[in-house]
Image (spheres, rainbow, N blue to C red):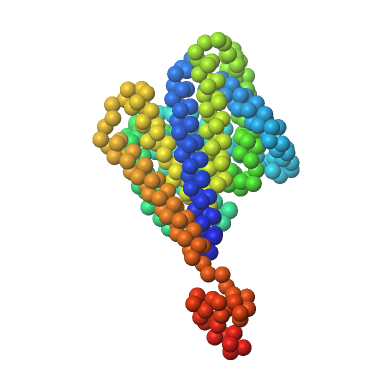
């Protein structure tokens, strides 16, 4: 691999990791805001949030002059939106099931990166970095220390475990679609994401909760918090798409995504008064440490490639130039003289 290719890949990975971490920070903020809105159902919040998201994406697309996609691209975009809705629905079902919350979180974040990297390797022919399995093991250990999985209740059906695995798979397919559509602007992907999400939320509300308004908007604190979460979530989702589109391989973004675990833990400690414990702190340090190490490795690779480019001697095009470059490329002088 040439130094220019290495430099470009490292720079892309650094940018992708930046957007992934920014995304996780923003989405952690959304999750914290949502906890202060207990009087809204999940479907109501989905309809209102993604309706605002749809307006923002549409306005941004018109402002930037993006063209509306057609043909197979539209089908892929709608399938990506469907994968996102399935991810949310399965995740919420997992959280509300008989499974302990720690088991749900660890199962989702353990399975989703593996599904994603394996699918990207098989379908998009992406390489799997040699260090990635070790990074995943360390991040999973950190996540387990933070979330502390517990023994499942004997009365809980074994099939319930399929819910978090399904959520992990759906999330992986959504991110895989982001990789396969990386030539499109992030707002276009999110626009179709919103279409499917709003349609799902409205359908669910009308069929299963007909007496409940899908738009419970009023001039109160809950409404203002949901609107704020919509704007913050919009920026978070755009950053997530940009992160997955920017990295050289999916494995890089999947490791950065583990930052969501220490961020959620930090919000519980600083915003909701949860007492920190030693094992959660160790798990947080493991995940943060592996991300810092991976980022530092990319930064070193980029600097090394840039240094090799600056030290590269331009090859001579004639024997006259070879005479001038004799100190740099003596072998070429001999060949020209011999000729």
- Give the x, y percent position of residue 3: 51, 62
x, y percent for residue 322: 57, 79
Q: Is residue 46 visible?
A: no
Residue at screen point 35% across, 34% down: 147
Left/right of residue 186 with respect to residue 255 in the rendered view: right
Position above or below: 101 against 313: above
Residue sitting at x 70%, y 32%: 62
Determine the residue positioned at 54% across, 59% down: 5
Quick check: can you spot residue 222? yes
Q: In the displayed structure, would residue 180 be above or below residue 154?
A: below
Position of residue 312 measured from the top left corner of the image (x, y, whole percent): 51, 67
Viewer-side residue, 75 vs 294 = 294
Question: Looking at the image, which is closer to me, 35 or 86?
Answer: 35
For residue 263, what is the image quadrant? top left
Q: State left or right for residue 285 relative to residue 22.
A: left
Q: Residue at x 56, y 70 (%)?
A: 314
- Front residue (pair 3, 197): 3
Image x and y of residue 178, in percent: 58, 43
Q: Quadrant of the C terminus?
A: bottom right
How many numbered marks have been drawn onto this rendered protein structure? 0
Task: Find residue 150 and report its image quarter.
Answer: top left
Pick out the residue farthest to the top.
219
Given the current orientation, which residue lies at the most extreme left position? 278
The answer to whether 262 is drawn above or below residue 317 in the figure is above
284 horizontally vs 168: left or right: left
Q: Is residue 45 left or right of residue 151?
A: right
- The residue nearer to you, when weighing 63 against 338, is 338
């Amino acid at each position: 691999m040439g130094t220019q290719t290495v430099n470009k890949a490292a720079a892309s990975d650094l940018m992708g990791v930046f957007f992934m971490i920014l995304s996780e920070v923003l989405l952690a903020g959304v999750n914290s805001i949502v906890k202060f809105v207990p009087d809204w159902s999940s479907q109501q919040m989905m309809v209102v949030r993604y309706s605002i998201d749809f307006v923002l994406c549409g306005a941004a697309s018109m402002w930037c002059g993006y063209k509306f996609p057609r043909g197979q691209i539209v089908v892929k975009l709608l399938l990506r939106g469907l994968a996102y809705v399935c991810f949310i629905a399965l995740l919420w079902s997992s959280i509300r099931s008989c499974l302990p919350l720690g088991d749900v979180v660890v199962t989702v974040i353990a399975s989703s990166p593996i599904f994603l990297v394996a699918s990207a390797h098989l379908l998009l022919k992406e390489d799997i970095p040699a260090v990635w399995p070790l990074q995943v093991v360390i991040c999973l250990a950190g996540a387990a220390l933070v979330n502390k999985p517990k023994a499942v209740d004997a009365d809980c059906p074994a099939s319930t475990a399929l819910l978090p695995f399904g959520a992990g798979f759906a999330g992986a397919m959504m991110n895989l679609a982001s990789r396969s559509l990386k030539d499109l602007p992030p707002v276009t992907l999110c626009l179709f994401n919103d279409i499917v999400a709003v349609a799902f939320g409205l359908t669910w509300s009308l069929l299963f909760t007909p007496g409940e308004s899908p738009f419970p908007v009023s001039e109160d604190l809950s409404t203002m918090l949901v609107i704020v979460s919509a704007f913050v979530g919009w920026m978070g989702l755009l950053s997530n798409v940009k992160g997955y589109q920017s990295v050289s391989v999916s494995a890089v973004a999947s490791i950065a995504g583990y930052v969501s675990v220490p961020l959620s833990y930090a919000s519980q400690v600083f915003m909701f008064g949860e007492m920190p414990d030693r094992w959660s702190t160790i798990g947080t340090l493991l995940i943060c440490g592996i991300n810092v190490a991976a980022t530092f490795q990319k930064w070193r690779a980029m600097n090394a490639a840039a240094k090799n480019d600056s030290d590269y001697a331009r090859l001579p095009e004639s024997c006259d130039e070879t005479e001038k470059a004799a100190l740099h490329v003596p072998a070429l002088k001999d060949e020209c003289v011999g000729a």
